[in-house]
Image (cartoon, rainbow, N blue to C red):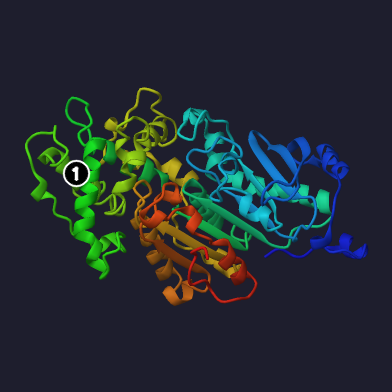
Amino acid sequence: MKPQIFGALLAMGATPALAQQDAADCTALRDTVITAGHVTSARVMPAEGTLPAYCELRATALPAISIEVRLPMEGWNGHYYQAGCGGFCGILGRADASGGWVNAMRPGLERGYATATSDSGHFGLSVVDGEWAYNNPAAERDWGWRSIGETHRVAQAMIDAFYGAASDRAIFQGCSTGGRMAHVATQRYPEMFDGIISGAPAMDYPGLVATKMSWIVQANTDADGNQILKPAKVPLVAEAVMAQCDATDGTEDGVIEDPRACDVDLTGLTCNSADGTDCLTPEEQGVIVKWRQGPVNRAGEQLYPGGVPEGSEPFWGLWLTGFEQGGGKLVPAFATGFGRYMAFDEDPGPTWSPLDFDFTEDPQRMSAAAAAYNGDNPDISAFRAAGGKMIVYHGWADAIVTPYKTVDWYEKAAEAAGGEESLQENVRLFMVPGLDHCGILPGPGGINAAALDPMTPLEAWLDGGTAPMSIMAE
């Protein structure tokens, strides 16, 4: 997609892969002038572990998008790699602090890419803090889409100033909200990225976080405001589901290959007391029925594709029910922050609760959010016409970002492209059995994000190789 602009280096008889800079070249970038922004710091970071020495730049794209750029001090491969962020973002470089690769610059930097990420345009106390968006449409716009393009713009200015050449390839990688950003990029910036990796994409925030997550909360709250299904009962549910679903794929291996093939009946576990851990009350079973169904309005119309998948029970503590020792239960936190400050055309503010969500009236009150945030348009013809390649992956055991939405998007994208065969020239979908949301927690057999490597097959695809058949790490 990008023209190769290597004149300056070629004139010196060098290539980007052999370019080498010193500390003075890095610190001098503090004086780089960029339109509608400024550089705030520049320093050399020494090589550590698998990461090479790099020039670390902090910059601001006006009004308030904080950006970090990492430029290899030597061995730059001539390419650019941009990472998304998770939740409501707001914490610059959070993913790189974890040591993993999801939403991190690490995979690019390890391979010699110039890399960048951003906080998406605001500072947050946590990734579930949505107060920054309160009556702040400019910040919502930056979070929704503008930070993607601004991060790219600032990073390219730094690359050109440091190496004297533009990058000749651009890759974007993100999961969850980062996956939403990946899909938004295909719509808003169809020629910006040659390759895109989208994991567990939360591509419809009003449908997912406001509607579906409020449904989750309301289903598990009794008339007195108490939680119905508690953490102690989750192992019982998980055991029953696995016993009934494990063999649906023909192999009993502790992994549910496709939850759509499961038809679980928990009535054999019925009891009348909520005190024991070896049975389920009708009220507790009712929670699970609603969770499996997903949100509907008063007319019974489905508002979001599918519900909580079978096989996700081992991860319910983190996302849905909380843990017996405390912590977890992030779905209510996301639903609360989003509904108070980010979802509605008029923000209700800090008194709003997911229990207030009206499944018949409220979906129509989120048009501005849908326009600013969503990336679920299945028509990616402009990205495909530009030659872009996209790998989409999602865990079948994802309890927070329902995998059925990703399957629904893929099927509609295939229809829009004139058939799956045509779509697969540019897009490949990988549904991973047993995988938690973005592979955060280990699933059956220990499968998590570390078991995946979408970068290697994407690079091979971009280099003219065959389309990927797997994203499992070797």
Residue 108 picture location, percent across and down? 65, 55
What quarter of the picture does the N terminus occupy?
bottom right
Q: Amino acid at mark 1?
A: Arg
In depth, the one of 69 and 339 nearer the eye is 69
| Observer able to see residue 325 | yes
In depth, the one of 172 and 38 nearer the eye is 172
Categorize mark 1 by other alpha carbons within 10 Å: few (<14), some (14-19), many (20+). few
Q: Secondary structure at mark 1?
A: loop
Question: Which residue lies under the disc numbered 1?
Answer: 298
Q: Is residue 299 left or right of residue 390?
A: left
Q: Residue farthest to the right?
A: 12
Q: What residue is drawn where x is 29% and y is 37%? A: 321
Q: Is residue 255 left or right of residue 228?
A: right
Residue 27 picture location, percent across and down? 83, 39
Q: Is residue 284 left or right of residue 427?
A: left
Q: Is residue 400 above or below residue 185?
A: above
Q: What residue is drawn where x is 21% and y is 37%? A: 229
Q: Residue farthest to the left?
A: 272
Q: Residue farthest to the top?
A: 351
Among the 4 quarters of the image, the one containing residue 97: top right
Among the 4 quarters of the image, the one containing residue 205: top left
Q: Is residue 368 above or below residue 449?
A: above
Residue 349 picture location, percent across and down? 40, 25
Q: Is residue 221 left or right of residue 14?
A: left
Q: What residue is drawn where x is 42% and y is 56%? A: 447
Residue 209 picture location, percent across and down? 38, 41
In depth, the one of 173 and 451 nearer the eye is 451
Among the 4 quarters of the image, the one containing residue 275: top left
In depth, the one of 168 and 393 nearer the eye is 393
